[in-house]
Image (spheres, rainbow, N blue to C red):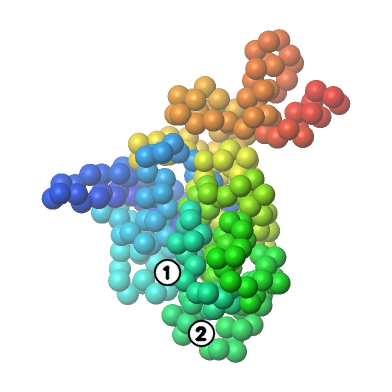
Amino acid sequence: MEMLKATDLHYSYEEDEQSCEVLHGIDLCVKKGEFVCILGHNGSGKSTLAKVLGGFFAPTGGKVEVCGMDTSLQENFKAIRQKAGMVFQNPDNQLVATIVEDDIAFGMENLGVPREEMLERISEVLGTVGMSEFRNSAPHKLSGGQKQRIAIAGVLAMRPEILILDEPTAMLDPKGRQEVISSVKELNGQGMTVINITHFMEEAVLADRVLVVSEGRIVLEGTPREVFSKEETMRELALDVPQATSLAHRLSEHGASIATDILTIEELAEVICP
């Protein structure tokens, strides 16, 4: 089942009465339960793509459909907000209340969810992201990773079917990054469709499919093994590959009989020390 589809997608910003096109004819399809990672260097258009896919921006050319609904039609806006939830880079920009449970309730209040159901959902989503004990805490006293998990909980409370993450771990330390990605992987394992925009290759390794965006176009697509095995191409696009992959390439270049599509340190260790 197609959860999200873009057909010949174009998007332009208007600046000083001039049009600047950022996305150029993108075609993509995301299926139910899929975990898709989008990579790209700064200025590649990946964050703009996330906002267009989530229905925050209407395409200036082509078409985007969320669960079969055209994002450019105003009558679909509310339904699309319920189908696709988005989490942004800075958790502080998404927290609006002084108590965690009030913050999670905010989106549901806008959707008109009855109070009793809201209380049930708050308990449910806090459990999902491992933050039940912080229900009555002040968000500003939480760590970065905890804040981001609360932001995710607020989106989940609105019962979306697609979770779009725009560099959600960019401002977090390694511990916070691990907390957030573990929660996201668990959600995906439960059937949530996930699109993660990131510049951390270790996160991309966890995806079912990786899309590489450059100059507003998709230039590489495939499984993590397929994409990261093209190390030279990735370097040309000003992108890294996982450290284990890079090391495997270096060992192969120096005569070692080793695959160059290794993704993790654990895989590499098994090959080197069977």
Label 2 and label 1: CA atoms lie apart by 16 Å
Q: Amino acid at mark 2?
A: Val
How many marks the image carries: the answer is 2
Q: Report the side of 20 relative to 30 (left or right).
A: left
Residue 209 image point, x, y percent: 57, 44
Q: Secondary structure at mark 2?
A: loop
Residue 233 image point, x, y percent: 49, 25
Against 248, residue 81 (above or below) is below
Residue tagged by mark 2?
Answer: 113
Q: Amino acid at mark 1?
A: Ile
User: Which residue is at the front of the view, 183 or 151?
Assistant: 151
Residue 208 image point, x, y percent: 61, 46
Q: Residue at x 56, y 33 (%)?
A: 227
Q: Quadrant of residue 65?
A: bottom left
| Residue 273 seen in this snapshot | yes
User: Which residue is at the front of the view, 62 or 238?
Assistant: 238
Residue tagged by mark 1?
Answer: 80
Q: Residue at x 66, y 65 (%)?
A: 129
Q: Residue at x 42, y 69 (%)?
A: 80
